[in-house]
Image: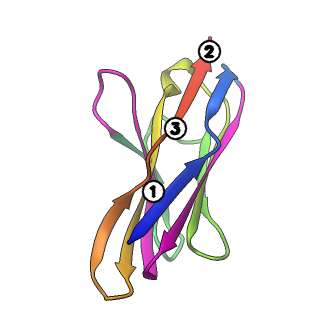
Amino acid sequence: QVQLVESGGGLVQAGGSLSLSCAASGSIFSINDMGWYRQAPGKQRELVAHIRRGGNTNYADSVKGRFTISRGNARNTVYLQMNSLKPEDTAVYYCTADVTTSVLSTDIYWGQGTQVTVSS
């Protein structure tokens, strides 16, 4: 059993900043890639940022230069620093992790989501 728990969402004015955190726990052997997705009302879930185990990152064009993804030293946490937020960044943000469990099965796990609301 693997759990991902996000924190750090909230309400912020346009131009402000928020930082999201996600911690993975449970029967984990190793965590490979981690990432953040978001889903706005009436829209499909979309990739925001992705970080590989080796540290390579990629971002959606809409957030490049404003958002930064990083992993903690313990490698079971992932962060999303969001600067210069815009109303169109309003969405539920989900953490994902590509996890190899202690019984050596690999699967993608999702967090429960955290709401980010940017007011204009």
Q: Return the disc, 2 or 3, that comes first in the chain's sequence.
A: 3
Q: Position of residue 22 (x, y in %)?
A: 56, 56
Q: Quadrant of the C terminus?
A: top right
Figure coloring: rainbow
The secondary structure type at the circle numbered 2 is strand
Disc 1 crowd, CA 10 A, few/some/many (<14, 14-19, 20+) = many
Name the disc covering residue 35, or none. 1
Answer above or below: position of 56 versus 100.
Answer: above
* Segment colored magenta: 16-45
Q: Position of residue 112 (x, y in %)?
A: 44, 47
Q: Amino acid at mark 2?
A: Ser
The structure residue drawn at horizontal position 67% and vertical position 36%, both measured from the top left corner, is 83
Q: Residue at x 41, y 69 (%)?
A: 2
Q: Residue furthest bottom?
A: 103
Residue beneath the point at 27% across and 82% down: 105
**Answer yes or no: do the residues labelled 3 and 1 have beta carbons within 8 Å?**
no
Q: CA distance from mark 2 to mark 3?
A: 17 Å
Closest to the camera, between mark 2 and mark 3, is 2
Q: Is residue 33 left or right of residue 43?
A: right
Is residue 52 one of those drawn in magenta? no
Say whether disc 3 or disc 1 marks the residue closer to the N-terminus. Answer: 1
Mark 2 or mark 1: whose residue is earlier in sequence: 1
Residue under pointer 3: 63
- Which residue occupies the foreground of this view, 117 or 15? 117
Dot label at residue 119: 2
Magenta-drawn stretch, dominant element (helix, strand or loop): strand
Which numbered circle lies on residue 12? none
Label 3 near label 2: C-beta < 8 Å?
no
Q: Is residue 114 above or below residue 43?
A: below
Q: Mark 1 is on which residue type?
A: Gly
| Residue 67 location, quadrant | top right
